[in-house]
């Protein structure tokens, strides 16, 4: 990575407030709040059907929101299409990567944005810029003229991420980047995410792997049933706490209210038994041990 790349100040770059999305009678998102700072990795986690993909597609311009506002660099914006998101500086790497296996690395990076010299492709300039970008990302790719079909899973993920950086986006969305990767390839992708943070990009990481989340994220946002169910700083949370929030053992999406007995029910007589006077624990509230840090050091404020 180039030593000349300064780390940008940690300013708020993206804020989503009260986002709602409905598909017919199904409420996919309800009053969801989400924000990203520059130079920060925010993990978006939740069970299947929690609304992660819908929220990302709203941000990527695939689905327009039915409610709520999106602010980018402090101004309210409308993202009506993927082209709008790209113009703002929001790049998305979906799980399928959308690479052309029959093309080499250079052709994949510049597909649709080819550089021209007159009426011909400027192959030399595109190759030089590809090598420069891959060196800044500390990518391990033997040759940029290698067909993508012959690359490993981690190298293919690197090519997809490098392609998203053409144009210097402010926010990069990674959808399950380590899914179906081996140990060595996963480590390669996680190192790449660290590099994106050092370059000053705001990174949104969607993952089901709590080990990966705790390894690279600064903050974790939990969605459950289309609603926010907790925001945690990674230095103060454990995987057990995150899993409890994901599964609903810890439910922060609504305020629990005491049950009111039906009308006409006579009040129960006071009991002199000590056990009878003890306040019962609500059935859906569990006591968890205090969360402890499993990270070394901190990465600043959230």
Image (cartoon, rainbow, N blue to C red):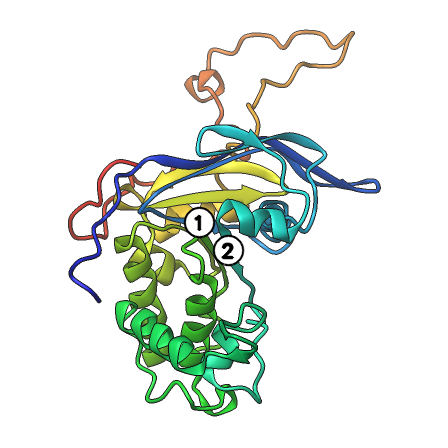
| The C terminus, quarter of image | top left
Q: Nearer the viewer, residue 69 or 131?
A: 131
Name the residue rendered at 44%, 75% in the picture: 159
Query: Mark 2, residues whose alpha carbon is within 10 Å: few (<14), some, or many (≥20)?
Result: many
* Residue receiving disc 2: 91
* Disc 2 secondary structure class: strand
Residue 99, compared with residue 149, is above or below; it is above
Residue 219, compared with residue 140, is above or below; it is above
Please report whichever mark, 2 or 1, sits nearer to the chain's N-terminal start: 2
* Residue receiving disc 1: 171
Quarter location, residue 131: bottom left
Q: Could you tell me if the residues under marks 2 and 1 are in contact, i.e. CB atoms within 8 Å? A: yes
Name the residue rendered at 22%, 67% in the picture: 1
Q: Position of residue 91 (x, y in %)?
A: 50, 55
Name the residue rendered at 66%, 7% in the picture: 267
Quarter location, residue 98: bottom right
Residue 297, compared with residue 167, is above or below; it is above
């Amino acid at each position: 990575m180039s030593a000349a790349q300064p780390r940008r100040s940690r300013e708020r770059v993206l804020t989503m407030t009260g986002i709602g999305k409905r598909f017919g009678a199904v409420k996919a998102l309800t009053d969801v709040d989400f924000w990203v700072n520059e130079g920060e990795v925010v993990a978006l986690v939740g069970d299947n059907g929690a609304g992660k993909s819908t929220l990302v597609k709203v941000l990527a311009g695939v689905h327009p929101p039915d409610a709520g506002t999106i602010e980018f660099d402090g101004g309210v914006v409308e993202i009506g299409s993927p082209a709008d998101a790209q113009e703002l500086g929001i790049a998305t790497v979906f799980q399928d990567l959308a690479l052309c296996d029959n093309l080499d690395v250079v052709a994949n990076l510049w597909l649709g944005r080819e550089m021209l010299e007159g009426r011909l492709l400027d192959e030399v300039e595109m190759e030089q810029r590809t090598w420069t970008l891959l060196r800044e990302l500390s990518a391990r790719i033997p040759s940029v003229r290698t067909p993508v079909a012959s690359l490993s899973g981690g190298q293919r993920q690197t090519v997809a991420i490098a392609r998203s950086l053409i144009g210097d986006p402010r926010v990069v969305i990674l959808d399950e980047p380590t899914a179906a990767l081996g140990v060595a390839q996963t480590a390669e992708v996680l190192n790449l995410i660290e590099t994106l943070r050092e370059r000053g990009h705001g990174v949104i990481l969607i993952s089901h792997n709590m080990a990966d989340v705790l390894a690279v994220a600064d903050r974790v946002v939990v969605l459950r049933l289309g609603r926010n169910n907790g925001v945690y700083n990674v230095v103060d949370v454990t995987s057990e706490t995150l899993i409890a929030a994901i599964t609903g053992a810890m439910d922060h999406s609504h305020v629990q209210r005491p049950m009111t007995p039906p009308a006409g029910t006579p009040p129960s007589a006071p009991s002199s038994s000590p056990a009878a006077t003890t306040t019962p624990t609500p059935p859906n509230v569990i006591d968890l041990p205090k969360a402890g840090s499993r990270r070394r050091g901190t990465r600043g404020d959230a």
